[in-house]
Amino acid sequence: KDETGKKGDYFNYIINAIKEVVDQRNYKLLIMPSNYKTNGEISADYAECLKAKEKLSEIFEVAILENRPYFPDEYQAMQQKLKLLITSRMHVGIMAATALIPVISINTQYKIRGYMQNIGIEEYCIDLDELSKLPELLSKTLQNTGNIKKTLSVSIPQMRLQQDKFITLFKNL
């Protein structure tokens, strides 16, 4: 929340959008916190995710990742089983998109929208001050998962090619 530069609780917008749009008979939810503490405590992020789990468990079957750090390959292996991902974290969104998972990104930093634009799915990026439109965006995303995956299957390899060219150029310096 505070790291976004804006105060407010966007978790409730996400929870309410999920409750409003998602059919609990067809979906199970996985909450994937981004910050963990390993000394027996939990981070503020993990605490908020536990609250979200409690609220969503009233309707849905909900799981939450253990309070431990995950390697990127572990995280992406879990993401590959998702129908879609809602995130406010750029790197989590990047990992999902590279696995061709449709992503709704909550734009907490200018670079998130830029990345979503680069991969051709900027319309699935929502600003904090527009979170009241999240139910509509979530519904649109669920209806268009095939098209989003198709877009990602073209844009992600194109980005990798550009990256490879840059790396080759950099190595030759």
Image (cartoon, rainbow, N blue to C red):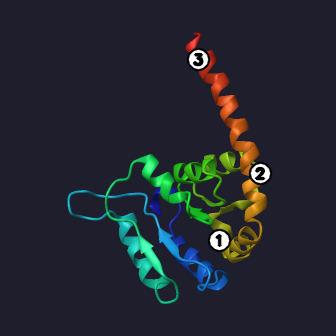
Q: Amino acid at mark 1?
A: Leu
What residue did someone put label 1 on?
131
Nearer to us: label 3 or label 2 = 2
Q: Nearer the viewer, mark 1 or mark 3?
A: 3
Q: Position of residue 122 (x, y in %)?
A: 74, 54
Q: Amino acid at mark 3?
A: Phe
User: Tag 3, which secondary structure?
Assistant: helix
- Residue drawn at the location 64% of the way across and 23% of the way down: 166
Residue designated by label 2: 151
Q: Residue at x 69, y 29 (%)?
A: 162
Q: CA distance from mark 3 to mark 2?
A: 29 Å
Q: Nearer the viewer, residue 87 or 146?
A: 146
Up the image or down, 70 lies above or below 163; here it is below
Residue behind mark 3: 170
Circle 1 or circle 2, nearest the eye: 2
Question: Label 1 neighbourhood size at 10 Å, few (<14), some (14-19), many (20+)?
Answer: some
Where residue 43 sits, quadrant-wise, is bottom left
Which of the numbered marks, if any, corresponds to residue 97? none
Secondary structure at badge 2 equals helix
Is residue 131 depicted above or below 16 in this figure? Answer: above
10 Å crowding of disc 3: few (<14), some (14-19), many (20+)? few
**First reached walking from the N terminus: tag 1 or tag 3:** 1
Q: Which image quarter holds the C terminus?
A: top right
Do the CB atoms of the residues marked 1 and 2 lie less than 8 Å apart? no
Q: Is residue 52 visible?
A: no
> Can you give x and y, in whole percent of width and height, for residue 3 in the image?
46, 56
| Residue ID at (24%, 64%) | 41
